Image (cartoon, grey):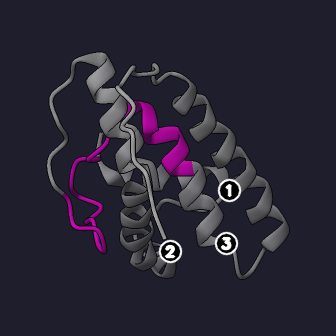
Amino acid sequence: MTNRDIYISALAMLAESSVDGDNEDYEERAPYLLAAFCTEARDTDASLRIALDERESDDFNAVFIPLENDFPLLDRFSSAASLYLAAMLIIDDFPEMSDRLYDRYCDAMSSIGRCVPAVCESIQDRYFYD
């Protein structure tokens, strides 16, 4: 799955055209917004990869991820990424709709987070003195 697939999904949620040149502003901002999403979801992705015994994700630029590149997280994150991208693309023009999409994004990330099993670790004794 490519980042462009996620971008096209976000456009579909917004009932926007996916024809090249119709949404130049959205297409220009999308790589930055996808990078922000991937940076936020990186830890959850890493935990889920460990639970699923998947290889580590490849490094990606935390500021800009080209639409032509493969989506750097597990495919499970693609719908959440589409919701996040759609919400952020319209945040200034349609804040109410953006809020609804962002709430759905939060629900999707919460659902993914519930799939990550707990890990038992030892507790370190630490004492702090003034």
* Residue matched to label 1: 15
* Residue matched to label 3: 90
**Residue 81 locus on image (x, y percent):** 49, 49
Quarter where residue 27 is shown: bottom left
> The N terminus lies in which quarter of the figure?
top left
Q: Which residue of the protein is positioned furthest toward the right in this rendering?
A: 96
Measured Cα–Cα span from mark 2 to mark 1: 13 Å
Measured Cα–Cα span from mark 3 to mark 2: 9 Å
* Amino acid type shown at disc 2: Tyr
Compare marks 2 and 1 and give the one earlier in the sequence.
Answer: 1
Quick check: 54 above or below 87? above
Compare marks 3 and 2 and give the one earlier in the sequence.
Answer: 2
**Residue 63 locus on image (x, y percent):** 31, 74
Compare marks 3 and 1 and give the one earlier in the sequence.
Answer: 1
Query: Nearer the viewer's eye, disc 2 or disc 1?
Result: 2
Range of residues picked out in magenta: 60-82
* Residue matched to label 2: 26
Labelled pair 2, 1 in contact (Cβ < 8 Å): no
As for residue 64 lying within the magenta part, the answer is: yes
